[in-house]
Image (cartoon, helix red, strand yellow):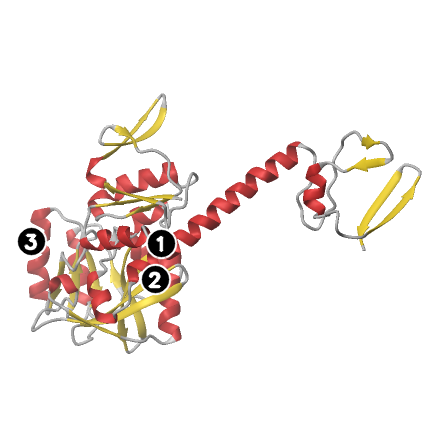
């Protein structure tokens, strides 16, 4: 089987590609910065360094929010042609915190109280009635970038003035006191494969490893696991990192990442997350190809007038192949019945009808 890993070539991506080579016959590392999608009268094409990207059995696409639209377009083109662990909608939703929170709320996933306003004046109205401290953050951004904490109305109003000058959209969210810690959960398929507590360093509010946070392995209870798995499922990511805060109201989801870094959680848990991802990709690609092959077989049998419902008898309209006193069954029927010449059978016959059953 042939696979492609589309990414920016980070250390985590290198680890993933290397792990995939243990399972796939061929793995191509594709730099997303050299991909272009063309749409025209001749259809859609995905080009890599000016040449057609080609065909793959599995494509795992990763990348920052800057490439969300491009990955969504690639997924739209390839999703029905090979196995892809991330749905098209995921690249649009997960890379936008606003859309992420809306999707989580729609599916009753617990999260901090979140405010969205259309104008600056409306935002000031929100700031006058919320409890402080609060979080103010950009819809797009990763690794804790674009996240600000305001301890008072005056502080929040100053941040609002800066955001207004930058003409940046933003989200206002309640601050959950966790002593600067959160939980990163790695979901692969419908399982939690690794989880760690991340603790911020010194006075830093963000616990992200890239912001200087430290990680240590943790074991989740079944309720927290279910919330993390449900989050990945509703956001359309078979491979997904989910960030959770522990609060007096229980686990609250604050973010999801369909291109999660592996260095921090691998070091903290001593679990080879890249290998678990690669094995999952291999098994699901194999299942995808088997289903694709079966679908092709069903079409051929349908064209021959044969039902492929396992609970139905199979019918074939054909002429008889008589060899002397012998009647030869068509090969396709012996394949369906699994008859072989070493087995005994019972034969019932009357004019115009013949019934053969394994003894």
Q: CA distance from mark 3 to mark 1?
A: 34 Å
- Asked if residue 109 shows in the view, the reply is no
Q: Quadrant of the N terminus?
A: top left
Asked if residue 141 lies left or right of residue 77, the reply is left
Q: Could you tell me residue 82's position as x and y percent? A: 41, 42
Check disc 2 and report the residue beneath it. Answer: 187
Neighbours of disc 2 within 10 Å: few (<14), some (14-19), many (20+): many
Q: In the rendered image of this protein, does residue 205 appear above or below residue 46?
A: below
Do residues under tags 2 and 3 come within 8 Å of each other at their CB atoms? no
Labelled disc at residue 162: 3
Q: Which residue does the image show at 76% across and 30% down from the upper left?
A: 318
Mark 1 or mark 2, earlier in chain = 2
Residue 132, above or below 1: below
Viewer-proximal residue, 11 or 172?
A: 11
Residue at the extreme bottom of the image, as rendered: 248
Give the class, few, some or many, for how many residues have Cα within 10 Å of label 1's Cα (few <14, many ≥20).
Answer: many
**Residue at x 33%, y 29% (from the top left corner):** 45
Which residue carries the number 1 mark?
237
Q: CA distance from mark 1 to mark 2?
A: 9 Å
């Amino acid at each position: 089987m042939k696979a492609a890993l589309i990414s920016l070539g980070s250390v985590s991506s290198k680890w993933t590609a290397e792990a995939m080579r243990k399972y796939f016959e061929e793995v191509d590392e594709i730099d997303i910065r050299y991909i272009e999608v063309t749409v025209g009268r001749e259809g859609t094409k995905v080009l890599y360094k000016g040449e057609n990207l080609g065909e793959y059995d599995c494509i795992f696409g990763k990348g920052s929010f800057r490439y969300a639209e491009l990955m969504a377009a690639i997924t739209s083109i390839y999703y029905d042609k090979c196995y892809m662990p991330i749905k098209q909608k995921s690249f649009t939703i997960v890379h936008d915190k606003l859309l992420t929170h809306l999707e989580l709320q729609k599916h009753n996933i617990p999260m901090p109280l979140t405010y969205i306003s259309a104008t600056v004046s409306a935002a000031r109205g929100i700031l006058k009635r919320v409890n402080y401290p609060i979080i103010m953050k950009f819809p797009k951004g990763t690794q804790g970038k674009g996240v600000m904490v305001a301890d008072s109305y005056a502080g929040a109003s100053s941040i609002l003035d800066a955001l207004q000058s930058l003409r940046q959209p933003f989200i206002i969210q309640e601050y959950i006191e966790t002593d600067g810690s959160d939980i990163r959960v790695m979901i692969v398929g419908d399982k939690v494969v690794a989880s760690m507590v991340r603790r911020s360093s010194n006075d830093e509010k963000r616990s992200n490893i890239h912001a200087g946070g430290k990680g240590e392995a943790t074991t989740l209870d079944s309720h927290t696991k279910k919330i993390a798995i449900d989050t990945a499922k509703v956001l359309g990511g078979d491979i997904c990192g989910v960030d959770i805060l522990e609060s007096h109201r229980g686990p609250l989801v604050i973010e999801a990442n369909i291109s999660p870094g592996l260095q921090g959680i691998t070091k903290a848990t001593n679990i080879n997350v890249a290998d678990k991802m690669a094995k999952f990709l291999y098994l699901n690609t194999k299942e995808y190809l088997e289903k694709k092959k079966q679908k092709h077989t069903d079409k051929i049998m349908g064209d021959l007038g044969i039902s492929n419902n396992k609970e139905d008898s199979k019918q074939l309209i054909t002429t008889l192949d008589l060899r002397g006193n012998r009647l030869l069954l068509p090969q396709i029927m012996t394949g369906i019945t699994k008859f072989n010449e070493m087995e005994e059978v019972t034969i019932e016959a009357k004019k115009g009808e013949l019934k053969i059953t394994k003894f």
